Image (cartoon, helix red, strand yellow):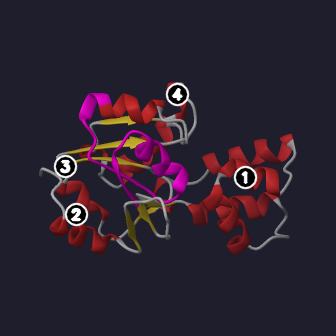
Amino acid sequence: MNILWDFDGTLFDTYPGYSKVFSKVLGGKVSEEEIYKRLKISLSHATEYYNLTDSQVREMETLKNDLNPGDFKPFDKVEEILKYADKNVIMTHKDRDGVLAILKHHGWDKYFIDMVAIDDGFPRKPNSQAYSHLHNKYHIDLVIGDREIDILPGKELGITTCIFGTKSDIADYCLSDYAQFFEIIDRNDFNK
């Protein structure tokens, strides 16, 4: 089984760290829980919703870069799935160096054979070009993300999709936690 993973909110719980940064930029006037909800839609949505100035966006980028790779925790049971898969790839709007730093910190860089990051020049999700690129190279069997924007490109390409941490009418499978993953595998043939 070859899996294409989203990064933020799918492999690692990055949103709490980003919510803290956003709250600091907003002067503590908005709760981290409220910011978290906006960030789950997208960073650009949260930036527009809170009407951040250019100066605040720059401050946020600086503060995000100050976060430690250890500040981001992997979700429970993800490593078991990474070990199970034949090939794992990542498609993310995060920069390559940031992703690699987090993966290396947790010893997970060994699980991934390829990645498309924001600095690779592909259009942003939900455009399917990056997914198509990875699918053509690795014949992806499953796309996993935490937002519909992460799985829409997979749906467009006819790849089985799985959404993590939320419900979705468009996902083939919805997981509230990764312990459920192997139940899905047991019920389906992904040519492992």
Residue matched to label 2: 80
The first of marks 2 and 3 along the sequence is: 3
The first of marks 2 and 4 along the sequence is: 2
Mark 3 residue type = Met
Residue matched to label 1: 45
Q: Position of residue 41 (x, y in %)?
A: 64, 58
* Closer to viewer: mark 1 or mark 2: 1
* Closer to viewer: mark 2 or mark 4: 4
Q: Bin the neighbour count of mark 1 within 10 Å (Cα to Cα): few under 14, some 14-19, many 20 and up.
A: few
Q: Assess whether mark 4 and mark 1 are in contact (beta carbons under 8 angstroms).
A: no
- Highlighted magenta segment, given as a residue range: 136-162
The first of marks 1 and 2 along the sequence is: 1
User: Is residue 151 rendered magenta in the image?
Assistant: yes
Closest to the observer, 56 or 37: 37
Mark 1 residue type = His
Which quadrant of the view contains residue 173? Answer: bottom left
Residue matched to label 4: 122
Q: Bin the neighbour count of mark 3 within 10 Å (Cα to Cα): few under 14, some 14-19, many 20 and up.
A: some
Q: Secondary structure at mark 3?
A: loop
The residue under the point 25% across, 34% down is 138
